[in-house]
Image (cartoon, rainbow, N blue to C red):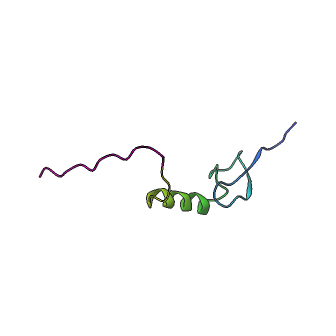
Amino acid sequence: MNETAHHLCPHCHRETTWQDNPYRPFCSERCKMIDLGAWIAEEYTIPGEKKPAEEDSH
């Protein structure tokens, strides 16, 4: 049995493979970079308590 596992790209939802895919879990470099940009732009958040802002002591 030589089946290749398929999954959906988390960004565009296109079916892609895990094996021999340098961009996994994404289907392409484009989807990978779009996702990274969303994290950098703080479009994604992880739930939790907000940390109080630190005052600048300088």
Residue pushed farthest left? 58
Say which residue appears at 63% left-offset and 50% top-offset: 22
User: Which segment did they paint magenta?
Assistant: 46-58
* Apparent side of residue 5 relative to residue 57 in the rendered image (left or right): right
Task: Tell me: residue 41, above or below residue 3.
Answer: below
Say which residue appears at 29% left-offset and 47% top-offset: 52
Q: Where is residue 7 in the image (x, y as percent from the top left)?
A: 74, 49
Look at the image and say whether residue 20 sits in the magenta stretch.
Answer: no
* Apparent side of residue 19 relative to residue 55 in the rendered image (left or right): right
Q: Position of residue 13 (x, y in %)?
A: 70, 58
Say which residue appears at 70% left-offset and 47% top-offset: 20
Query: Which quadrant is the N terminus positioned in?
Result: top right
* Apparent side of residue 42 relative to residue 30 in the rendered image (left or right): left
User: Which SS type dominates the magenta stretch?
Assistant: loop
Task: Tell me: residue 29, above or below residue 4.
Answer: below
Residue pushed farthest right? 1
In the depicted view, which residue is nearer to us: 13 or 27?
Answer: 13
Q: Position of residue 25 (x, y in %)?
A: 64, 49
Say which residue appears at 37% left-offset and 47% top-offset: 50
Q: Quadrant of residue 48?
A: top left
Task: Tell me: residue 30, above or below residue 8.
Answer: below
Please tell me how many numbered marks the rendered image carries. 0
Q: Position of residue 30 (x, y in %)?
A: 60, 63
Look at the image and say whether residue 53 sits in the magenta stretch.
Answer: yes
